[in-house]
Image: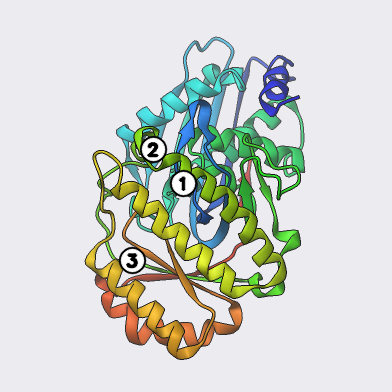
Amino acid sequence: MSYKQKYLEQALIPGIFKNEFSGSVAWQCPSNIALIKYWGKQPNQIPMNASLSMTLEKAVTKTEIAYNYSESREKINIDYYFHGQRKKVFEKRLLDYFKDLTEYFPFLDKLELFIRSDNSFPHSTGIASSASAFGAIALCLTEIEYHLKGESVGTAEFYNKASFIARLGSGSASRSIFGGLVEWGRHESVKGSTDETAIQVSKIIHPYFKNFQDFILILDKGKKDISSADGHNLMNSNPYASTRFQQAHSNLNELIHAIQRGNMEKFINIVEAEAMNLHAMMMTSSPGYMLMKPGTVEVIEKIKRFRTKSEMPVCYTLDAGANVHFLGPQSCKPVMVDFVENELKSCCFDGDYIQDRMGNGPEKIKDE
Ligand code: PMV
């Protein structure tokens, strides 16, 4: 049975709650950086290819949802604040999202929600803010469902459902529900993988990848020229799309082998090729987009020269934006810190970068 079918059936089971009910839930959910990129989708947020990402530790969204349930309410009411400011535009996106969720969470229409979110990193700069934002909201909503049904949260089943719900908000958010290295999308190399939820692959990784480092070099703080939703849609008419989907499929297979065996050379080749391919897809769409800035190219060149000179197994990747993620094993951390401070910091906007690393996944903040 598909997860969709299972969760639709669950939605028919009545809750044990009273006519009026209120409470508050809060989750911290990390962002993630894709090593194999998801770019292109089918309806219902089904990916055109499987993707694989590393969950981060410090780049997180904290979200608290206070809720009032009333049997007599006919329509959901929400009130969304981001860093203390009401955000009507995101409220609209959330209302559309919640509308899509009512078939899984029929109780949503009876809720009044007060949502407060804070990010630990700049919004809309190519750091996957939608992944952590929708991840945190999905965890909160899934917890509310569990409360209303009198079930305990934190089980494997709970996280699986949260990943499914997060995916419907933002595909990459499905991966943020788990720590370490996470795969999303049906792929023969990952047992149990599905297009509906993400799955953790950390159990099979070589020690090189434990605590893997990610320095996020902020090269631009402006809003992106194109939303990822529009970017995914452009893949429907991109002439290179089908080759790209096949390439992502075989890259994922090769990357999994490299991660299992600790083959850093292969890892570096694939991760950097994926970054270039993602941007090549954006450039060759119609209209085409160039999301790199001059600083992006400068930093990439510096990282490549540094790798040749130092012989350190470090590399870069990009998200759908100008910022560069500088990646490397924990053993390279001291050298990476020096290089960033002495060579890369000066390229960054206001000298800003986030020193992050692989994280353990979301954390529940409070429950009242
Ligand atoms: O989850 P979305 O719809 O924001 O798409 C994310 C796409 C990329 O961040 C560019 C790649 C990825 O796999 O995270």
Q: Amino acid at mark 1?
A: Arg
Residue 153 is situated, as x and y percent measured from the top left of the image, at 72, 40
Crowding at label 2, few (<14), some or many (≥20) Cα neighbours within 10 Å?
many
* Residue highlighted by disc 1: 244
- Kind of residue sitting beneath label 2: Met
Spatial CA span between label 3 and label 2: 27 Å
> x, y percentage for residue 195?
62, 36
Q: Residues within 10 Å of mark 1 (few under 14, many from 20)?
A: many
Q: Is residue 33 above or below residue 14?
A: below
Which mark is first along the chain, 3 or 1? 3
Query: In the rendering, at what x and y percent does residue 345 appear?
Result: 32, 78
Which residue carries the number 2 mark?
Answer: 235
Q: Is mark 1 within 8 Å of ligand 1?
A: no
| Model colouring | rainbow
Closer to the camera in the image, 108 or 292: 292
Residue at 71% x, 65% y: name it.
260
Figure quadrant of residue 91: top left
In the picture shown, does residue 361 fall above or below 137?
A: below
How far across and down, in percent of the image, does residue 48 sit? 52, 37
Q: Which mark is residue 159?
A: none
Q: Residue furthest bottom?
A: 309
Is 254 on the left or on the right of 64, as rendered? right
Q: Reading the chain from its start, which is encountered first: label 2 or label 1? A: 2
Q: Disc 1 to disc 3, how far (Cα)?
A: 27 Å
Residue at numbered disc 3 = 218
